[in-house]
Image (cartoon, rainbow, N blue to C red):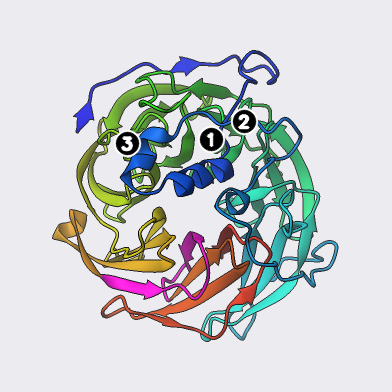
Amino acid sequence: MDSGTGTARRESPGPPGDGRRRQRWTRRRLVGALGAIGGAAAASALAGCGGDGGGGPAASEEARRGAPPSQPSSSAAPRASSDPSPGPSGVRPLYLGTYTSTAGGGKGIGVAAYDGASGRITGKGTITGVPDPSYLAVHPDGATLYAADERERGAVTAVRLSDGKVLGSRATGGAATCHLSVHPGGRWLLSADFGSGTVAVHPIDASGAVGERADLVRHSRPAPRPGQRGPHAHQFVTAPDGRHVLAVDFGTDTVYSYRLDDRTGVLTEVAQAHTRTGAGPRHLTFHPGGRHAYLANEADDTVAVCAYEPSSGRLTVGRPQSTGAKAGVNYPAQLAVTPDGAFAFLANRGDNTVARYAVEAAGGRLRLLGTTPVAGDFPRQIALSPDGALLFAANQRSGTVSVFRVDGANGGLRLAGGPFASPVAVCALPL
């Protein structure tokens, strides 16, 4: 279900504050509307929400789908003193994203460490001064952490990990920045703005700090599906070939492929891939082989295997498949693939499970193996440790992070101890 090249409108690189600052959806408000409607009918009813009207998001996913339980209080220090670097015991660093403007939320980026053998998490503190850091990414050299500031005036923030110093923030030019990633070359930071349906590129200097925006593109075509007031960019990531970057847009049911000019940071659209109407694509994860990717469709509760052509950047979306969810209402969130490409995992919000898939046909096929309870509520995001031996689930409503040992032979998940308390946990980044 792939189409040819479309057109995306390039926005002025100037600061926000123009006519685009109108009523917007935020991700947290969107999921609540889905929950209120429920089932397949929700896909056609994702009409515009009102804007926040303030500096931070006015309503969280929890508020829109029912108040969450009381969040655990944080024992974190005001600022982390240092990066919990790997030690002789196999302790590794772990960073946690949250919403700071939500009741019961965090105070910034949580700093923790995990034992690579047992999976046990130990809290180390908090990096303050970063508002609503809902998604995190690290520079390829491991020295700098980047956060998506999910607020009406979207921004990205850089943090030096050696001492937790905030290196500064830059406006994306859009609203409700919800995802970011670092280009493998380490020179460019890519970000997606859910509220405005824009994607941005920022340069990264030698210190790891973020420079003024190099490009901003709004997804103007195809038009948003019925019931949507505008596009909603949810992810911006580099393909394994390194020459193309792909943006997943929930509102237009489209994955956009761009060629990134490595000298200037300018984006040129080269292809579009369309899901079926109402799928609501959220997150794309590539297989290590580089010729296939897996797409989580939030609105219609499916996943799809996609074929990818590195030479052209063209993605072709396959048929929708089951998430394994048994709950009446479920919103698949994020996929993770083991480093050897043998297994894939999917976070099921609503069903509160992690779906397990065997990856077959050199990445071209997913076979559902079953689901595992996540031991938490509303797993917003999952991530594997670099060696693939542990899986972390950030459970937004329960305010916890669950850790599972991954069986390399069959993809089985076994809970590694009790959950770690982390207020409104929406992202876990193990290094």
Q: Which of marks 3 and 1 is in front?
A: 3
Q: Quick check: 217 left or right of 75?
A: left
On the image, numbered disc 1 is attached to which residue? 194
Magenta span includes 375 = yes
Q: Which mark is residue 402?
A: none
Residue 127 visible to the viewer: yes
Q: Which portion, as a residue range, is magenta? A: 370-389
Residue 85 visible to the viewer: no
- Amino acid type of the residue that numbered disc 3 sits on in the rendered structure: Gly
On the image, numbered disc 2 is attached to which residue? 175
- Among the 4 quarters of the image, the one containing residue 213: top right
Rate crowding at label 1 as few (under 14), some (14 to 19) or many (20 or more) other CA atoms within 10 Å. many
The structure residue drawn at horizontal position 29% and vertical position 51%, both measured from the top left corner, is 302
Viewer-proximal residue among 183 and 55: 55
Residue 254 picture location, percent across and down: 34, 32
- Amino acid type of the residue that numbered disc 1 sits on in the rendered structure: Phe
Residue 396 picture location, percent across and down: 58, 61
- Amino acid type of the residue that numbered disc 2 sits on in the rendered structure: Ala
- Among the 4 quarters of the image, the one containing residue 57: top right
Q: What element carries label 1?
A: loop
Q: Quick check: 186 left or right of 78?
A: left
On the image, numbered disc 3 is attached to which residue? 278
Residue 357 picture location, percent across and down: 26, 66
Quarter containing the N terminus? top left
For the view shown, which residue lies furthest in the left direction?
361
399 up-or-down from 182: above or below = below
Viewer-proximal residue among 139 and 62: 62
Q: Is mark 3 on a helix, strand or loop?
A: loop
Rate crowding at label 2 as few (under 14), some (14 to 19) or many (20 or more) other CA atoms within 10 Å. many
